[in-house]
Image: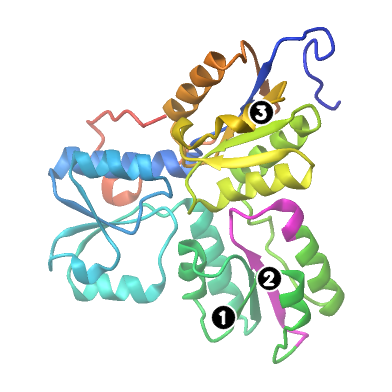
Amino acid sequence: MPWKPIGANNSAQKKIYLLKPRGFCAGVVRAIDVVKIALDLYGPPVYVRKEIVHNKHVVDELRQAGAMFVEELEEVPTGARAIFSAHGVSPEVRRQAKARQLQLIDATCPLVTKVHLEAVKFAREGCTIVLIGHKDHDEVIGTLGEAPQQTFLVSTVRDVDALHVPDPRRICYLTQTTLSLDETRDIVIRLKQRFPLIQGPPAQDICYATENRQMAVKAVAHFCDLLLVVGSENSSNSKRLVEVGDNTGVRSFLVNDWDDVDTGWLEGVRNVAVTAGASAPEHLVEKLIVALKEHGFHQLEEVELVEEDVRFSLPGELSTAASGLTTISTR
């Protein structure tokens, strides 16, 4: 049964629809815990290649705790301890780490690892791989590296129309885990029209958290005048939430926190929906809600469409060493 707001037509008060699930997914919780546990076990500095997750508040907090964020492994001293981010890395980066004798901890999200393993499998079978994703995103760069000579990146239906592959009978597709469900569906439909024998992954690659947050936005969009998505500009899944809101006809904005909100957006608004990307800390949402209440949005309804109970175990490099430690995630 479609969700309907409580007392939608019975109150003149301004209202906040607080979407749930929102914020941290299991892969983000795991990645942040990996850095915190490594700092607890080994002390600073611990080097992290790229942003551990795409949120500046999280990165700043971990930096203050002693994590050293670098762009490339050549910035890490030989033999030091280094962590791969949740977005995954290419085999070439792993080779570089081995050559530098780094003590590695891999915080790659297991759902991203799943896509890498699918790419390896398809490549070994001699297939051309069509990777649906966004150019220059860390996750896509890592996945492309698994079979660079056999993989073509597409981001739009137009890219599919321009695609030429060596053998249309041996072709498959994979996707970045944080894409828009609707956009990806259109691309897959076009791929199947052009290449009827194309294979897909056994289960969709778009992660459960991305899907759940997008479905929640769709559920409330028609009841709202404004959607605020808490997340960083380089967060793919956060940007997709804004796109989903826009596509359903509600004005939608991506904000790092309340400081990014233009109060002019609130003029004439009766109902505002609030959600957060999968790497945005909950305390930023809480501050946003407090500020909205100060601007007259006194009613609040939490909208939970599905319960998330996914948990990922720590990487093997940490699980034994950390068995006696307790860490508190930045939820």
Q: Nearer the viewer, mark 2 or mark 1?
A: 2
Count of numbered circles in the view: 3
Front residue of 185 and 224: 224
Front residue of 227 and 187: 227
Q: Is residue 67 left or right of 298 when viewed as pictured?
A: left
Q: Nearer the viewer, mark 2 or mark 3?
A: 3
> Label 3 is placed on what type of residue?
Ala
Kindly state the secondary structure of the residue where label 1 is placed: helix
User: Is residue 182 part of the magenta span, yes or no?
Assistant: yes
Which percent across, then down, holds residue 127? 65, 82
Q: Residue 124 carries which label?
A: 1
> Visible in this render: residue 194?
yes
How crowded is the residue under tag 3: few (<14 C-alpha within 10 Å), some, or many (20+)? many
Q: Residue at x 66, y 40 (%)?
A: 252
Residue annotated with mark 3? 273
Range of residues picked out in magenta: 168-184
Q: Measure the alpha-carbon separation of dots 3 and 1.
A: 46 Å
Which quadrant, please, contains the N terminus? top right
